[in-house]
Structure formats: structure tokens, C-alpha cells
Amino acid sequence: MLLSTATLVTAITGYSSRAYASGPCLGVGATYHCSGSAAVNTTGQIINHVDAEVIADPGFGLNTTDSIAISITGDGALSYTDVNYSPLSAAGKSLSVISSGTLGSVTVKTNGALSGNLFTQNDGGGALSVTANGNVTATGNYAIYARNSGTDLTVTTGPGTTAIGGLHGLASRNYGSGALTVIANGNVTGTGNYGIYAVNKAAGSALTVTTGAGTTVTGGYRGMFLTNYGPGALSVTTNGNVTGDTYSGILAQHRGGGMIDITVGPASTVTSNSLSPGRFAITTRSGATDLTVAGTLNGSPYGGAVQFDSKGEFNDRLELRPTATINGTVLAGPGTDTLAFGGAGAGTFDLEKIDTSTKMGQFQEFEKFEVDSGEWSFTGDTTAPFTVTGGTVKGTGTFGDLTVNGGTVAPGNSIGTMTVGNFTLGGGAVFEVEVNAAGQSDKVIVNGTVNLTGATLRVLAENGNYATSTNYTIIDNDGSDAVAGTFAAITSSLAFLTPTVVYNGGTGNDVVLTLERNETTFSYVANTYNQRAVAGALAQFPNENALFLAVLNQTEAGARQAFDALSGEIHATVAGTLADDSRYVREAILGRLMQASHSGEALSAGGPQVASLDSGAYALGFDGKSLVAPEPAPLAFWTRAYGAWGAFNGDGNAATADRDLGGFISGMDANIGRSWRAGLATGASFSSVDVDARTSSADVALHNKP
């Protein structure tokens, strides 16, 4: 056999302890270690062995003009492992691993940069796994190719990597019995065709494709081409951007007739840049689709954003999340299709975008409309019926019929009006109504029938000075039928006004809410002595008094806060603080009296309050000093500064107070007899008192006169 530029490393099946061949990849038994740098290794390596295990040692690299840098073949479990960032470069394939026989499996882990195709194929009965943690660049065909006839096929690219192929960026075909999984944590580009190409044949089960945050998948034709012939679901989750330059961003088709699940994450954008008609950001075929969009779909200007299967009668579902942006038309298809609103947070939607007959609206051929979660504010008009199973429906929109089996209906975005055909509130529904002191409230105008059986009415009152009784029309029933059913429960945020409802008010079949003063006293909701004192005083005020009305419309917590605010607690706190702080003046004067008999300088280091033993210290009997007290000075002038800060802890009734203090006191005194001394003092102090829990503060300036 003639070997031109490649070194053939042949292993004899069976046990052997010696190394084979003389190239950079030397084997002992089935284990091969590759060493030497790319500057030295310029000849491709061919390794054939049962259960061949090839390991790239530190510093290994191979750069060749041969068609393959490293080729690994044989029966059994074949593997190539590089954890040392070993680069491979060849004219065709940088790495080729092919396992044959009934027991075959392939495991590839790369970290170094590969220039040339990463080619893997398992014809055995095991799994095929490829993990590329380094960049892969190939000018022809595929950057990464994986074909499996065994069980599971998994292809993963590492974070921060790129896989660029002249045709496809990443191509995978599973002819085995297991699942096909593609995880792109790096950027993938197929210059001529598809960014990601994944086909799961009939024997396979599920096909799953996931892209990482911040990644891009780009195809010159389509960003992703995905087909599942197996019985399992076809699932796609995009957390980065997917772009098809001349066709769709994503084509997902289920030839087995199973479910197609696609989720576009909040930071993801799927785009079709095609300038031809009939191109969409996302296209699905041959299976019912559940599409959830939290990110952005940029449809082709001559096509649209989404096209579900246009021939089969599949029950497709599109769920919009509050962060979703849809640019382009959405075509649902012949089946019974649902436009749903879900997710967490607050979103908005214009009902004018729903097309019910003209084929001119953005969302076409949907038959069912539902709100499942989130807080959604609707504007515009539609004749489409809506069903609410969870979340909150707000806004000023006009619906066909509105049936609420769960969740909340809250007309307006503050106080506002919603219009519906038939209005049905089931046992799990909440009708939330805002009211104000001016007599305005949320309202639903009903042009059909009203059924309230088992629902809950929740009344939220805005701040204001409410009268002791106010009426609000909350359901304006323009139909002729009487209201069916009543609210099972009525709740209110107000402590002292009770909501009551009549169902034949207004023109005879309107629902009217009345807020009336209840028997709850102000003192009943008070918790502390100070709060009860204020509550008792307010109860004596006339009903039309502004302070009385201000408390009347409060919740229990709001009423207690109002009692605290009206208590004047800061005044008592300041008085107590000043009494405590007066000790600084007393201590200054009494301290001077203790020093008055000393003959040295007033308040100097020689005074009896200072613990020093210098030459002027008053320490009788120390170091030979006289035990006879010195004569006092006949006249002395003195001054003393003081400052402090601290807190007085609350006791459950009064709140914690913070205090800062600064000041001084000066004086003079003289001897007027052998045992008598007279003097005078003056000074000033400045205090700041804060009671944060009561939103109160005080600044005090005191001047002490002689």
C-alpha cells in the first residue's frame, strides 16, 4: 500500500502493550496519546482500532494540507478528547470519527480551534455525542456534521464559540432509536444554506433544539431547518437571535404528525430577511404548533411573522407574553386555532389587530381567544369572543363576548370603561372595581346578557373625602334581560364604608354599588394608646369635617397611619428629649463647682476631674507633694463645649426617636469668703429630633441666660 502524505497508524485487534507507529499519535492498546505542536505535526493521522480512545496531550496541535487531520475508525466505542485547547487544521476535515459494527458509539469533546469539518458518524448501536468547546470553521459543506444510527444523538457547542460552514453551520441526522438534541451555546452560521440543520428519522423519538442567551444562528437560506419523523415532540427554544437571509428564520415540520413546541425567549429575535413573497420568521408544517413568543419576531416585508400549516386542520396555539413584539402578519391555518395571552408582568394589546373576516388584520384565521396569565390592558375593538382563565384583563377595549372562568376583570387602567357583548363571570372570577369620592367608578357596558353567578366583587377605593353614602353603576346593562345570578362575595379596601349591591338598579337591570358608613368605630381599628386617643377625638367630629372624611375612606392600616400622623407625638418626644439633655448643663456647672477650690487654671489638667499626674495635678501625697490643699483662685473664668447623638427606642406606642445635640456653656466665679464662692453662667444648645415612623422632626435652639 502506498501512503502519500498520511501516516497510517494500524492497531491489531487484541491486547498489546507496545506503541504503534511513529507519528504524533502513539497507541498503547486502544489508547492513543497525541503530542507535539502544530508547527511540527504537518502530516495527517489515521487511527483504526476497536474501542479507540484518542487523547490530545497538552501542547498538541496538527496543521496539515492533507484532506484529514485526524481520522479515527473502528468498531466499538470510539472517542476523541481534547481538554488542552489543541488546534487541528486540514484541507478537508479537521477531525473525522466513524464507528462501525453493532456495538459502535462515538464521543467527541474538543476545546481547540478546528479549521476544517468536524465529521462524526456512528453506524453502531450506541449513542453519538459531540461537544465542541472551540471554534469550528469550514469553507465547504458543514462546520459540524453528526450522523447516528444507534440510540441518542447529541450535539453541543460551547459558550463563546463559533461554528461557520460553507453550506450548513451544524448538521445532524439521527437514524437511530433515540432522541436528537442540539444545544447551541455559541454562534452558528451556515453561509450557503442553514445555520442549524436537524433531521430525526422515523425510528427516533424527540427532536430538541436550544440556543443560548446572546447567541446568533444565521443561515444564508434558513436560520434553522428542523424535521422530526419520530413519534416524539419537536421542541425549539431560542434564547438568542435566529436569522434566515433569503427564506424563513425557522422552519419546523413534524412529518410524524406530532406536536411542534416553539418558545422564543424574551431576549431572542427571530428574523426573515427575505424579499420574496411567502417568507416568514417562523413557519411550521405537518403538525399542531404551540408557539410562545416572549421576544421579537421580524417577519419578511413580503411575507409575515408566523405561518402555521396552511393545509392540515391542526389546532395551533400562539401565546403572547408581555415582552413580545410581532412585526408582520400571523396566519393561523385551517384548524381551530387559539390566540392566547399569558406570562408574568404587564402587557398591552390592540384588539384592532385581530382579523375576523377581512384578511387585512395582523392576526388572521384564529377562532379562539383567551387570557391565561399576566396583566393585560386591551384597547381597540373586536367582535371576537374572549375567555379568561387566569391573570387580569384591563383597559378600555370592546370585546365580543367576555367569559371569565378564572382571573380578574378590572375595567380601565385607572377608572375606565370596558364594553362587551355577553358578560359571564364564573365562580372563580373576580370583578375588580375602582371608585373615587367624586362618584366615578370602573364600569362594564354590556350589550347582551349578564351572568354573575358565584363571582367575587372586589372594591378598590381611591383616596378622597367620601360621603357617608355613594352610589356607583358598575355594570351598565344595555340589554333587556335581567341580571342572572349574584356575587358570592363582596370585598372592599375601606374599613369604615361597606359595599352593597343591587342588581336591578339604574334603568332596571343595571348593577349598582353603594358605599355606606358601617358600624366599625375608629377606635376599633386602633392598636396603641396614642391611636385610640386620636380615634376617640375624631369620632366626636361632625361627619362633614375634612379630617373625619379623610380617615373615613381609609383601610384599617391607612386609618392607623392617619391616627399616628394626627397624634402630635413629636411634641411629647421633644419635651422628653430636652429634659434628658438638660443634664449636660447641670454636669458642666456642678463640675466647675468641684474644681472651684483648685488654685490652678480653671478646668485645666490640674483639676480634680482630670485623671492625669503631670506637674500641675492635684494628687496630694503623690511623689512627695504636700498634703495641704492649695489656696483657691480668687476669680476664675471658664467654658465648656458638649455634644451627643443617639436614639430613644420606641415602646410600641411611641416610635423610636433619633437625636443630635451640640452646645456650650461659659461662666465666671469668685471667692467671696473663706468657704463661699459666687458665680454666673450662660450658654446655648442646638438639638435636632427625628421620628421617622411618624414622618416628624423638630429643631430646637436653647439659650441659657445667667
Image (cartoon, rainbow, N blue to C red):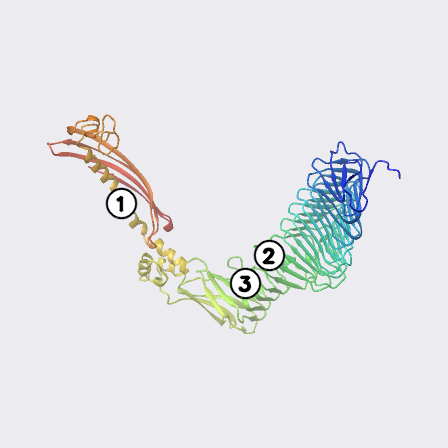
Q: Which mark is residue 343?
A: 2
Query: Residue 476 location in percent, x, y?
Result: 53, 67
Q: Residue furthest right?
A: 1
Secondary structure found at label 3: strand
- At 29% across and 47% down in the image, what residue appears? 574
Secondary structure found at label 2: loop
The answer to whether mark 2 and mark 3 are in CB contact below 8 A is no
Q: Which tag, 1 or 3, sits closer to the chain's start? A: 3
Q: Residues within 10 Å of mark 2 (few under 14, many from 20)?
A: many
Q: Which tag, 2 or 3, sits closer to the chain's start? A: 2
Q: Which tag, 2 or 1, sits closer to the chain's start? A: 2
Q: CA distance from mark 2 to mark 3?
A: 15 Å
Q: Amino acid at mark 2?
A: Gly
* Residue where numbered disc 1 is placed: 580
- At 30% across and 49% down in the image, what residue appears? 573
* Residue where numbered disc 3 is placed: 408
Q: Amino acid at mark 1?
A: Asp
Above-or-below relation of 110 to 508 = above
The answer to whether residue 71 of the structure is visible from this angle is yes
The answer to whether residue 465 of the structure is visible from this angle is no
